[in-house]
Amino acid sequence: MSMITVAGWHPGSLSTRGSMAPIILMLVLLIICIAAAGNTSEEAFLDEVKAVDRNFDNRSVPLDHYVVEDTVLAKENYQGGPFRVLARKKRIERYKCSSCHGDKPITVNEGKELTHGDIELEHGRSGTGLTCIDCHHPEARDYLEDKKGRKIDFDHSYQLCGQCHFRQKRDWLGGAHGKRVTNWAGDRVIFNCTTCHNPHSPRFEKRFPATYSVPMN
C-alpha cells in the first residue's frame, strides 16, 4: 500500500514532527500542573481537618439564607423547641379593620362592594358555611375570635384554624403539613396557614398533576 500524500506532506515528514512537538510539550506540562494542584489542595484540606481539636457540632451549621420576612414567635408547644411563623398582618391590604369598622356611620354608597367585593366566602360545608362573624371578632375588629370567645391576633391565625382543622394543625406542628421557610438548619421558621390558604376560600382548586401517565388499558 502506498502512502497518501497531500500537497507534498505526509505523516512521517520531519516538518510535521517539529511543528507538533511544542503542542505536545504544552499538553504534558498542563497535565502535570493540574495533577500537582489537585494533590496540593487535597493535602491542604486534610491538614486543616487534622488540625481541628474539637468535635463537630451538627447544630452549628451556618445559615445559607436568612429569613427576611416579618416573623412572630409561635404560641404553641412543640417537642422540637420554640419556632417562628410568618407574620400575617402586614400582608393584609386593608388592615387595620377598625379604620372603617367602628362607631362612625358608613356613608359611602355600596361601601361593602367597594371594600370587600373581591371576597368570595366559600368556607365550610354547603348549606352550613361560615359567615364573617364566625371568625372575626364582632367588637374588637382588629382581632379574630375562636368559639370560646377568645381574641386571636391575626399573626397567630393558626390558633383559630386549628380549632376545626385540628388534624392539619397537628401535622403542621410536626412539619408534615405546610412548609419551612428557607432554612434547613438553625431557627425553625414555617409558613402560617394563611400563607398558602385563602382564609375565605381555603380549598385549593382541582387541577391535573404536573405529569400525567396515560392508562395502559
Image: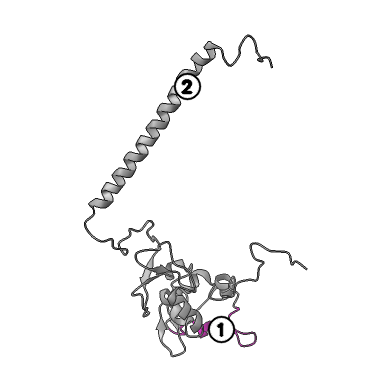
**Viewer-side residue, 155 vs 97:** 155
Magenta segment range?
122-139
Q: Residue at x 43, y 69 (%)?
A: 190
Mark 2 neighbour class, 10 Å CA radius: few under 14, some 14 to 19, many 20 or more? few
Name the residue carrying label 2.
23
Judge left or right: residue 102 versus residue 212: left
Judge left or right: residue 6 versus residue 111: right
In the rendered image, the residue lying farthest to the front is 1
Rendering coords of residue 167 (x, y %): 50, 82
Instruction: Kindly tell me whether residue 141 is visible in this rendering.
Output: no
Name the residue carrying label 1.
131
Task: Name which residue type carries label 2.
Answer: Ile
Q: How is the image coloured?
A: one colour
**Viewer-side residue, 164 vs 3:** 3
In the rendered image, the residue lying farthest to the top is 8
Residue 133 drawn in magenta:
yes
Q: Residue 122's quadrant in the figure?
A: bottom right
Magenta segment, prevailing SS (helix, strand or loop): loop
Q: Residue at x 38, y 36 (%)?
A: 35
In the rendered image, the residue lying farthest to the left is 53
Q: Residue at x 40, y 63 (%)?
A: 184
Dot 2 lies on which element? helix
Rendered position, 159 above or below 60: below
Q: Tell me how far mark 2 sits from mark 1, CA to CA.
A: 82 Å
Quadrant of the image for the C terminus? bottom right
Dot 1 lies on which element? loop
